[in-house]
Image (spheres, rainbow, N blue to C red):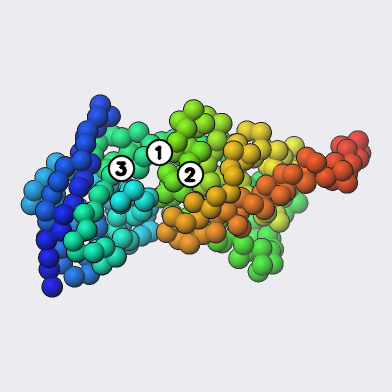
Amino acid sequence: MSYQAHFKVWRGDADGGGLRDFTVEVNEGEVVLDIIHRLQATQTPDLAVRWNCKAGKCGSCSAEINGRPRLLCMTRMSVFEQSETITVTPMRAFPVVRDLVTDVSFNYAKAREIPAFVPPADLKPGEYRMSQEDVGRSQEFRKCIECFLCQDTCHVVRDFEENKPAFAGPRFLMRIAELDMHPLDAADETGLDRKRAAQEEHGLGYCNITKCCTEVCPEGIKITDNALIPLKERAVDRKYDPLVWLGNKIKRRGQ
């Protein structure tokens, strides 16, 4: 069963643009990316859109549908009324390259700022041992497909461009939380304090835990509850808990 749907798709580049109206055929079982491809094939062959796997695993086709950050390939047409006008726009938090394609290099720059896992000096590869509970906690965060929808919806960077230099965003604060929770990460032994870095270098304090990042995550990662809130608690303990503060002083003096 097919029907004609009304779409508004943003067309333009870094210099500006606007929404263009299209009426396009929709077939049963299709997703928004199918419709974008049909528009390319039948009406606007120069429409730019980034995509790859079409299976919700590469994170390439991130955009905004009716104002909500989504993956084009995982948004079924059946969730909309047939009479509804569907608006597709590029991610608002990042500069437009052309049409639905945005420049997400901000995210790769932030990724490079985060020091990698530090293996224990006394263990060789193959000797690492972790409890299943620790493995499960880390595995949740590793489901991230780098779609950057959480970065796009986070109002700290979405609405305030000036915050970007000081704020890593939920995706990379989650990465810091993963490393800080890792029982084998020996960053502290090298003088790297991940909790302090999260607060002072990556803008953890900017996050006010509205959970908007969790709401748009296509992998269902509980970014706020399982990563950002625990990281905030750890950072606060390190800085303000008098017993932790005293313990750190004694430890430094012993070194």
Q: In which quarter of the image is residue 126?
A: bottom right
For the question of whether residue 216 can be seen, the reply is yes
Q: Quadrant of residue 55?
A: bottom left
Q: Residue at coordinates 46% horizontally, 49% vertically from top-left?
A: 150
- Disc count in the image? 3
Q: Residue at coordinates 71% horizontally, 49% vertically from top-left?
A: 233
Viewed as shown, does residue 20 lie left or right of 171?
left
Q: In which quarter of the image is the C terminus?
A: top right
- Tell me the kind of residue under disc 1: Ala
The label on residue 42 is none
**Secondary element at tag 3:** loop
Please provide percent x and percent y for residue 238. 78, 43
What distance separates the C-alpha of mark 1 from that of mark 3? 9 Å
Q: Identify the residue under disc 3.
A: 90
For the question of whether residue 108 can be seen, the reply is no
Q: Quadrant of the N terminus?
A: bottom left
**Secondary element at tag 1:** loop
Residues 20 and 198: in front is: 20
- Tell me the kind of residue under disc 3: Pro
- Tell me the kind of residue under disc 2: Cys
Please provide percent x and percent y for residue 77. 24, 63
Q: Residue at coordinates 62% horizontally, 62% vertically from top-left?
A: 137
Residues 79 and 194: in front is: 79
**Secondary element at tag 2:** loop
Query: Could you classify mark 2 by the number of other residues whose Cα lies within 10 Å: few (under 14), some (14-19), or many (20 or more)?
Result: many
Q: Identify the residue under disc 1.
A: 93
The label on residue 154 is 2
What distance separates the C-alpha of mark 2 from that of mark 1? 8 Å
Q: Residue at coordinates 34% horizontally, 48% vertically from top-left?
A: 67
